[in-house]
């Protein structure tokens, strides 16, 4: 019996030594071009954003290595979507919360206590956390920055490849990066062809349709939706008219600019009875019904976009993801209908779900007010 116990301890010791021998300092290039040394393969990871992107790259099995997340940007902002993933990811329901940078609840102490081998952090959180970044790195936890918000092709690709490197899913990440770059370049080639053929530069207004038609929601200046609009060769009427990357644009300014296309960024927010609704559980009829009060705003009846039926709902979560090319396809189709006549953005989103996500596609994600 004693010999068996000794043999067991010996085997466990060997296994521990083997695991330690396999772990090696490896350089990872993150979204900002930072060279970060991470001990790979990792055993524990903390994650503050880009949950669907992490899932697409690492798979459901990758979540077994996650020891903490910022719950507010997922469970708090988009609980209906979170609940779908919770049903597919066994350990998500009880996942420890590391807090959130936007509401001041992010805790470096909590991150450190979870002992992750790496923290995957969004670019905007990285900028907001200040001294907490130094605390975490000082505790020997490397931070890899992931950024899909800036809407820059190189950051999308670098973020995807960094996720793949960290999670040991480089082939999967490369497949996704290749898919994204192909779709992105196809969209821009079609836009260029349309422009060469004489397509005009159309004015676009985008607004976060969250609080109801009687409240002016945020618009975007050279980031997220704003960057998508200008990338597609259109004129974002908010450019230079709001002080930061996002914020409300005066209603009189919208009327004065008289946009050709209006996009209402929408979602399945809870407790937002007047919001424009899209998402997995939303029907086209619900989306259009929630969009109509915005189209009927005072002074909007003479806008070119309203008279042409060019006001659409589009899921807000699509403006900063690994599959935001479907949002680009939809907007480009509104801007250049002939050039994108054979492109079906909804079919693209369905195909992405089928191949890369653990939840089934359903619902309404982007839709014009008129059938």
Image (spheres, rainbow, N blue to C red):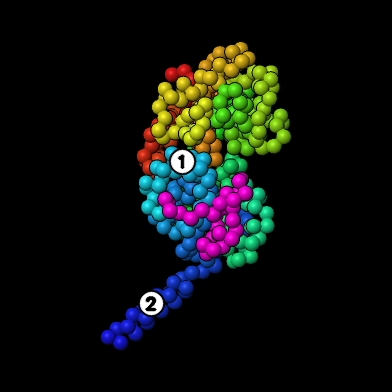
Q: To which quarter of the image does residue 209 belong?
A: top right
Expressed as whole percent of the image width and height from the top left, the position of residue 89 reads 39, 50
Q: Which mark is residue 246?
A: none
Name which of mark 2 and mark 1 comes first in the sequence.
Answer: 2
In the image, which residues are magenta?
92-121
Cα distance between the residues tagged 2 and 1: 42 Å
Residue for badge 2: 12
305 up-or-down from 238: above or below? above
The answer to if 312 sits in the magenta stretch is no
In the image, taking residue 237 as reference, residue 73 lies left or right, namely left
Residue at (30% x, 87% y) in the render: 2
369 up-or-down from 34: above or below? above
40 up-or-down from 359: above or below? below
In the image, taking residue 248 as reference, residue 16 lies left or right, namely left
Residue at (48% x, 47% y) in the render: 51
Crowding at mark 2 (Cα within 10 Å: few <14, some 14-19, many 20+)? few
Residue at (44% x, 59% y) in the render: 65
Expressed as whole percent of the image width and height from the top left, the position of residue 94 reads 43, 53
Q: Residue furthest left?
A: 1
In the rendered image, the quadrant that contains the C terminus is top left
In the structure shown, which secondary structural element does the residue marked by tag 2 occupy? helix
- Magenta stretch, main secondary structure class: loop
In the structure shown, which secondary structural element does the residue marked by tag 1 occupy? helix
The answer to if 102 sits in the magenta stretch is yes
């Amino acid at each position: 019996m004693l010999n068996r116990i000794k043999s067991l301890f010996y085997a466990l010791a060997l296994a521990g030594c083997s695991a330690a021998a396999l772990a090696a300092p490896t350089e990872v290039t993150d979204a900002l071009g930072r060279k970060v040394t991470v001990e790979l393969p990792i055993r524990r990871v903390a994650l503050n954003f880009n949950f669907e992107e992490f899932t697409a790259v690492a798979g459901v099995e990758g979540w077994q290595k996650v020891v903490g997340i910022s719950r507010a940007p997922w469970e708090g902002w988009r609980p209906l979507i979170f609940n779908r993933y919770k049903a597919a990811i066994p350990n998500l329901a009880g996942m420890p919360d590391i807090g959130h940078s936007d509401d001041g609840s992010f805790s470096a102490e909590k991150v450190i206590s979870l002992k992750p081998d790496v923290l995957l952090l969004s670019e905007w959180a990285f900028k907001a956390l200040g001294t907490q970044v130094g605390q975490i790195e000082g505790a020997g936890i490397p931070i890899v920055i992931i950024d899909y918000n800036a809407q820059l092709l190189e950051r999308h690709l670098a973020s995807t490849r960094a996720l793949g490197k960290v999670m040991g899913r480089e082939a999967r990440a490369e497949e996704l990066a290749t898919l994204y770059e192909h779709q992105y370049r196809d969209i821009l080639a079609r836009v260029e062809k349309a422009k060469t053929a004489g397509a005009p530069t159309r004015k676009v207004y985008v607004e976060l349709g969250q609080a109801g038609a009687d409240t002016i929601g945020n618009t975007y200046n050279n980031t997220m939706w704003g960057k998508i609009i200008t990338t597609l060769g259109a004129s974002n009427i908010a450019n230079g008219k709001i002080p930061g990357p996002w914020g409300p644009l005066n209603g009189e300014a919208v009327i004065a600019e008289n946009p050709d296309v209006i996009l209402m960024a929408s979602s399945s927010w809870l407790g937002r009875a007047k919001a424009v609704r899209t998402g997995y559980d939303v029907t086209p009829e619900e989306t259009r019904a929630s969009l109509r009060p915005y189209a009927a705003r005072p002074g909007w009846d003479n806008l070119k976009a309203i008279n042409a039926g060019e006001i659409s709902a589009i899921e807000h979560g699509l403006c900063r993801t690994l599959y935001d090319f479907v949002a680009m396809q939809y907007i480009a189709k509104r801007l250049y209908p002939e050039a994108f006549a054979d492109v079906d953005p909804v079919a693209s989103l369905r195909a992405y779900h089928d191949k890369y996500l653990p939840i089934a596609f359903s619902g309404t994600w982007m839709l014009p007010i008129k059938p």
